[in-house]
Structure formats: structure tokens, C-alpha cells
Amino acid sequence: NRQILLDNRPEGEAVASNFKLVSTDTPALKDGEVLVRHHYLSLDPYMRGRMNDSKSYAASQPLGEVMIGGTVGEVVESKNPKFAVGDQVVGMGGWQEYSVVDGNAPGMLRKVDTTHVPLSHYLGAVGMPGVTAWYGLVKIIAPKEGNTLVVSAATGAVGSAFAALAKARGCRVVGIAGGPEKCKYAVDELHFDACIDYRQHPDVKTMSKALKDACPNGIDGYFENVGGYILDSVLLRTNAFARIALCGMIAGYDGAPLPLQNPALILVNRLMIQGFIVSEHMEVWPEALKELGTLVGTGKLKPRETVAQGIESAPEAFLGLLKGKNFGKQLVKLS
Ligand code: NDP
């Protein structure tokens, strides 16, 4: 069982030498446990925060242990009557090829149906990132038909699900993404009404002008994934009583400061800004997963994936995710 451990903590930007590849035997199963062979590992931006030991909403990743991570795979051995060999499952198996899981622990392992939804999508659109988009849209932005909504990191796992969910509610949806290829894809394949390439608009002045052009009626709701000058630019274009779901600030995860230039706009435009962590809202997951599964099953949401090959490629793929090298959900295929 090859595993990636967190070997040491980043000083500034995360680097490949923060991780270490090791190989161990899988332990014999105790009663109630199952052995899962992972088919895919999910790489997610939150993992960067876990690499630090500073205080946050989630515990930091202990050194010398397998990196935390969502996985999908199949049961290859079972000492638990609830799981049979061959069952397809989603869990938090970590950056490794196999995991031993207590099948009785609540929420640790969930069987999934791959008849209409491919297994890998349970880590993306029909998994944690999809529910994240759903929560921010439905519970925080709570849009009305005809509202103009904006989302950053628009073509990623969360952003692409957000677009499908918002279009289904009759909204105008404008994306912000890095590069012409991602922006074209957002409009052509993800059904965004417009998409702004932030690399062509590298400051508040040009970005807020681009937002004005793309959102002639102003912005009623913003789903924030990035932070920094993009947030400042959006605030300038918000309508009175606009709602902002503060989901992520990836531009700052590797240590860059993200000062807010004009907080008075929150007062002037009477904005509601709400941060949230999707794992604290397990009550919405069944409803959200049902809608997301239907969108994928009916072809209304066709999630794109970037797939790295083999556990040894996980560190580089993860560092690439923090720099926007992924195009859609970043996964690692485990052989
Ligand atoms: P993505 O698939 O969107 O991948 C990350 C993307 O972020 C990159 O592709 C890149 O897109 C963009 N990005 C990276 N660095 C920068 C930068 N410096 N400036 C601007 N954009 C950048 O990831 P996810 O969909 O998994 O996650 C999106 C966001 O949602 C993250 O901020 C994440 O932390 C947050 N999140 C929050 C959760 C919660 O519970 N609050 C749960 C899950 C995710 P591009 O090339 O277009 O810039």
C-alpha cells in the first residue's frame, strides 16, 4: 500500500518536498472493518490549510501521517455484514492506495450507485464540492429568478456545479476564470451567460469594468472562491442587499495577504456576507446530492476532470491545483 505522508510543513508556498512517499502492508481486518481499494483520490484546496499548524476551523494534518483526502473505490475484503466485496464506496481514505475502514462508524463509508453517475463524480459534482455550491447558492445567496450571480474559479469543481444549479433557478450566471480556454469552456459547455478572464483584467479598475459590461443590471449574488482584488471588484458592482457566500479564498492559501480595499461598500450597499463550511451542514447533503445527481444523470451538468496517474503524482497535481493548472475537478487515478 503506497501512501503519501505530510513530512514537514510549508514555509510560504507549499512544495513537493513537504510530502513523502512510503510503502506499507495493509493490516489484517478486525471485526466490523472493510478493506477498500481506492480508484480515485480527490485533491482539494482545503488540504493546503491542513498543512499549516495555525489555528483554523479544522484540525491541522499531523506530521508523519497519511494526508487527509476523499476517495472512491471498491470493497475488496469485508468483515462487516453491511459491506460486500465489490461494493462501490466513497469515504475519506486519504492519499494512499488502500484503506482499512470501520464500516460501523457513522459517515465513514457510503455505498454509491454508479448506474447513472460515474464513480469519480462522487468526489466532485455529486460529492463535497457539489454540495458546497448548492449550500452557498440555496442557503446563502437564495436567488430569485432573473437575478445576476457571479462565481469565481468558475470552471472548477465547485464553480461548474454552481453554474448548473443557478441556471436551473433561472438566474443570469457570470463566471470568472483564468485564461481564454477556461472562459470559452465556461460559456460553451457549462452554460455560463458570460465568463471573464481575470488574467486579462489584473487589477480592480479593469476587472470592475469587465464586470460592469457582463452584469449590466448589477450583481445580486456572489459566490466567492478566490478573494483579493477580485472580491474588491465584485463589491463595486453589487446591488443593494446583494448576498455573498464566502466559500474560499484560494488566492491567499499559499500565504499571500488579501486585504479588502473598500469595506465601506458592505455598509453602503447593505451587503450580507456569510462564510460557511460545508461539512458543518450535513443536514442539506441528501437534498443537495439528489439534485446534483439528477443534473449529472440527465446530462445538464457534465463535470470535467483533470486526472493525474498514480499516487506518486499526487503532490505535483496538488501544487498545480493551487496554481490553476487543473481544468475541472482534480483527481488522482490509482492503479
Ligand atoms: P477548483 O477545482 O476550482 O480548483 C481551484 C481553482 O482556483 C484553480 O483551478 C484556479 O482556477 C483557481 N485559483 C487558484 N489560484 C488562484 C489565484 N491565485 N487567483 C485566482 N484563482 C485561483 O477547486 P474547488 O472547486 O475544489 O474549490 C473552489 C473553492 O471552494 C476553493 O477556494 C476551496 O477552498 C473552496 N471550498 C470551500 C468549501 C467550504 O466548505 N467552504 C468546500 C469546498 C471547496 P483559475 O485557473 O480559473 O484561476
Image: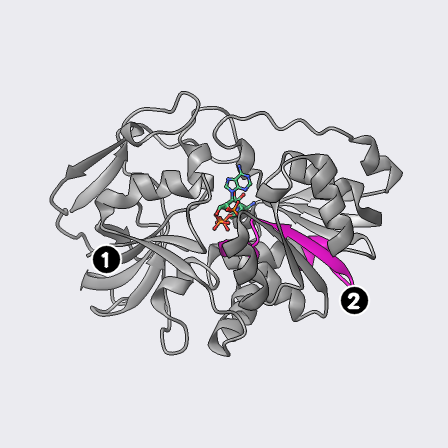
Numbered disc in front, either 2 or 1? 2
Toward the viewer: 187 or 296?
Answer: 187
User: Quick check: is 227 in the magenta stretch?
Assistant: no
Estimate the x, y position of residue 23 in percent, counting from the top left: 14, 40
| 4 relative to 321 in the view: left or right | left
Please tell me how many numbered marks the rendered image carries: 2
Q: Quadrant of the C terminus?
A: bottom left
Highlighted range, magenta: 138-159
Vertical relation: 185 (above or below) 63 = below
Q: Which residue is mark 2?
A: 146
Q: Earlier in the sequence, mark 2 or mark 1?
A: 1
Left/right of residue 131 with respect to residue 95 in the rendered view = right
Residue at x 41%, y 77% (from the top left corner): 116
Q: Is residue 147 magenta?
A: yes
Residue 80 is left or right of residue 258, and the answer is: left
Marks 2 and 1, Cα distance to the nearest angstrom?
A: 46 Å
Q: Amino acid at mark 1?
A: Val
Residue occupying the point 62% across, 56% down: 135
Mark 1 crowdedness (10 Å alpha carbons): few <14, some 14-19, many ≥20: many
Q: Mark yes or no: residue 155 visible.
A: no
**Would you name the residue on which mark 1 appears?**
36
Query: In the image, is residue 156 above or below residue 302?
Result: above
Q: Could you say where residue 295 lies in the image, as x and y percent from the top left?
A: 54, 73
Q: Which mark is residue 83?
A: none
Which residue is pictured at 70% across the width and 50% down the height? 222
Viewer-closest of 144 and 301: 301
Q: Quadrant of residue 205?
A: top right
Ligand 1 near label 1 (Cβ, under 8 Å)? Answer: no
As displayed, is residue 247 above or below residue 135?
Answer: above
